[in-house]
Image: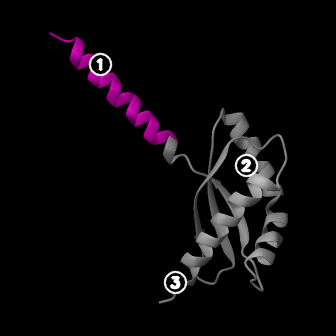
Amino acid sequence: MSHRPERMAEAIKKEIADLLRNEIKDPRVGFVTITGVEVTRDLSYAKVFVSVMGKEEQRKETLEVLQKAAGYMRSEIGRRIKVRHAPELIFKLDVSLDHGSRIMELLHEINDQEDKSP
């Protein structure tokens, strides 16, 4: 069993974060966090999970901009990590952070209700 997909995923995550921080200057890209990358066994596709702060409309717009910039990012990744064929990038919205914060809100509400009850 090869560990190459995991190593490739980590390298892609690092490079995309760097590209977003230094190269992609589109104002429609909001506050984006790369939460994970999954690479297929044959290294042809990479799902990039992103968390975007803001309203649903801003999230959709950011995801569209990222998908449009995927070709540029793919070529940069291929050049930076020196692979013959860089995987095709597919951006997916990661809502797990939203679920976690909603659960925390509910727990705080339950605790507040218990404190107020006799």
Residue 3 is labelled as: 3
| Label whose residue precedes the other's in the sequence (1 or 3) | 3
Query: Would you place residue 60 above or below residue 49 in this image?
Result: above
User: What's the CA distance linking mark 1 and mark 3?
Assistant: 47 Å
Q: Are marks 3 and 2 in contact (CB under 8 Å)?
A: no
Residue type at the position of mark 1? Asp
Label 2 secondary element: helix
Label 1 secondary element: helix
Q: Which residue is mark 2?
A: 63
Q: Are marks 1 and 3 in contact (CB under 8 Å)?
A: no
Name the residue located 64 percent from the left edge and 72 percent from the top edge: 11
- Few, some or many C-alpha atoms within 10 Å of disc 1 (few <14, some 14-19, many ≥20)? few
In this rendering, the label closer to the viewer, 3 or 2: 3
Point out residue 72 in the picture as x, y percentages from the top left corner. 85, 65
In the image, residue 100 lies in the stretch drawn in magenta? yes
| Label whose residue precedes the other's in the sequence (2 or 1) | 2
Q: Which of the pair 59/21 is nearer the observer?
A: 21
- Few, some or many C-alpha atoms within 10 Å of disc 3 (few <14, some 14-19, many ≥20)? few
Name the residue located 59 percent from the left edge and 70 percent from the top edge: 10
User: What's the CA distance linking mark 3 and mark 2?
Assistant: 29 Å
Residue type at the position of mark 3? His
Q: Which residue is mark 1?
A: 112
Point out residue 49 in the picture as x, y percentages from the top left corner. 61, 57
Query: Would you place residue 10 above or below residue 63 in this image?
Result: below
- Few, some or many C-alpha atoms within 10 Å of disc 2 (few <14, some 14-19, many ≥20)? many
Identity of the residue furthest to the left in this view: 118
Tell me which colouring the rendered structure shows: one colour
Q: Which residues are magenta?
A: 98-118
Residue type at the position of mark 2? Leu
Q: Which of the pair 43/31 is nearer the observer?
A: 31
